[in-house]
Amino acid sequence: MTRHMEVPFESSAENRSRVMSDVIFEQSDTLRLDTGVTSSAGIKQINEDDADCVVPDHSYKLNSKGACAVIADGVSSAEAGREASQYCIKTFVDEYYKTPDTWSVSHAGQKTLTTINLKLFKKSHAFKQEEKGFLCTFSGLVIKSCTAHVFHAGDSRIYRLRDGELSQLTRDHTVNVGKGRAILARAVGMDNNLQIDYCQSEILPGDLFLLTTDGLHDFVSRGEMVNMLSCDLSAQDVANKLVNTALESGSDDNISCVVIRVVTLPKETRNDFNSRLVRLPFPPPLDAGMNLDGFIVEREIFASSRSQLYLVTDEESGQQMVMKTPSINYQDDASYIDRFIQEEWIGKRINSPYVGRIIEQTRPRNFLYYLMEYIPGIGLDKWMAKNPQPKPKVAIEIVKKIALALEALHANDTIHQDLKPANILVDEDLNVKVIDFGSVFVAGVAEIFVPLEHQGALGTASYSDPHYLMGKNSGVQGDIYALAAITYELFTGKLPFGEAIEQCRTPMDFDRLRYRNAYEFNPHIPVWFDRALEKGTSLDLGYRYQSLKEFVGDLTAPNPEFLRDDPKIEQSRGVLFWQVMFGFWILMLIIVMILFSSS
């Protein structure tokens, strides 16, 4: 993927200019762009602007996701404007290209922006005493096939020059407060729900797009913009010239711009790639030896009423992978199809050695499926059957690795929701990988929480937080419950509430459940360890752990709170008391008998 390299820009601290040569392809019908990016601190000491332009160097990715140009202006009054703009730009260009090829540009861009917004909003509120705000404007342009897609929040701008006429494609989200002053009414990180302006328009060969921050467009007239954009210079030279002009015109702010000249367009306008792929048929049941899009099926790994997993080999590279296909039972279910597609996106966003990796597609798909790394190993459920009550050191290492996998998800505001032994793979070296994102909930993307279905069989309901089953999203605490239940089973071979939980249907049913002490099934378990498990699986969210770190900490080191009224200690004290009392009575009886006999 081609991106800009940083090179020094003339004068001023923290200035930078990023240059990229023309993207040239052999095919005459391929999208070809001339681009330039310049970002300068201007007369200020710190540059709170950021900008970037990405053109995929692989034709498949360029066709499926398009080229991306973005610009952001950190809100200087928000103390962390610089960090906000840098995070927003870097994360958008990284995360956008991780979204499924089967998503439309609008869907992918808006989901990416809403997750970024929630992250910045949370960071702002993490500094309660410092009141440190992570706020920035954002304007993004995605050029895919013959269509321009615009995403916008704030007062940075996107222009289009066509046939000598300069049109502003965005509107400033500002409020006039009088005396010539205006304040920003909308920005990324300002609120937990981000309102994004989105529009799209047809592109023609020769179109020029300009992205600017207010340090440029407040000081360079539209006429000057038209003249510079129309001159016979490279896009990068035009970007540099625009920034210099703003500086010479007295700009007292950071100055940034992105210039994109459309050199060639595909000969034919394609239908949106997402719409086309979503209409692709579900793959048929696959048998060993069959070839699907260049992948040879080796064998079926798993099949259920909802999906199938196959071990496949890539004809080109020889690499073994796992192909996940949707079940034909749901080929008319739009909600199911959307969640299946979302699984691929979620997997691409998580980068952890303890989470199954999604493999990037490099060839067009003729069927709906996605690819994952092949992990030789077995499910934790089968591993536990082969290793009943393993050594505590081994068991706790497995628990720690599962916790690290969950932390990677939670760092991306993602809740697994269906963690169970069958969704955890363990190999011979005790490497652990958490898989299956079919029930995952992603915060900040306007998702509606969907309660898990009660399967009525030992499995999901035994490890899922009862609050899920009753329709309440308990977030991180739900994953903690599942991990605590799995830990309980690792050490005892049992479940904390037994199989009775499978029969629960109403809140009253769950109220009747009683936790079974782990040391009843494994006498070697210390009371403090058992109480950590009890707190982790508590049905009272006010008492249950709120962080994985706290839960794992109490599993690996005794919590003094759990030792204050240790029933074993109390029991030992009681026995000692009665032993002393019995000895005293015996002594008194002997004394009385001696006195009686002497008289």
Image (cartoon, grey):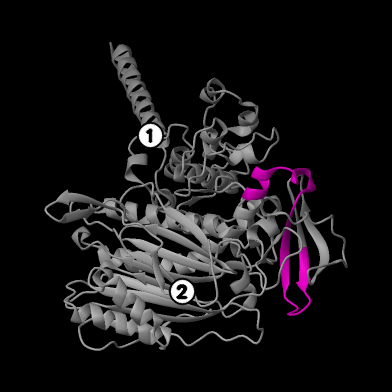
Q: Which residue is mark 2?
A: 163
Q: Can you tell which quarter of the image residue 458 is in?
A: top right
Point 40% across, 30% down: residue: 575
Q: Amino acid at mark 1?
A: Gly
Marker count (numbered) = 2
Q: Are marks 1 and 2 in contact (CB under 8 Å)?
A: no
Residue 379 percent coordinates (x, y) = 68, 55
Secondary element at tag 2: loop
Compared with 534, 315 (above or below) is below
Residue 65 percent coordinates (x, y) = 58, 67
Q: Is residue 552 left or right of residue 516?
A: left
Q: Is residue 114 highlighted in magenta?
A: no
Q: Is residue 365 left or right of residue 109?
A: right
* Magenta span of residues: 311-339
Q: Which residue is mark 1?
A: 542
Point 41% across, 42% down: residue: 545
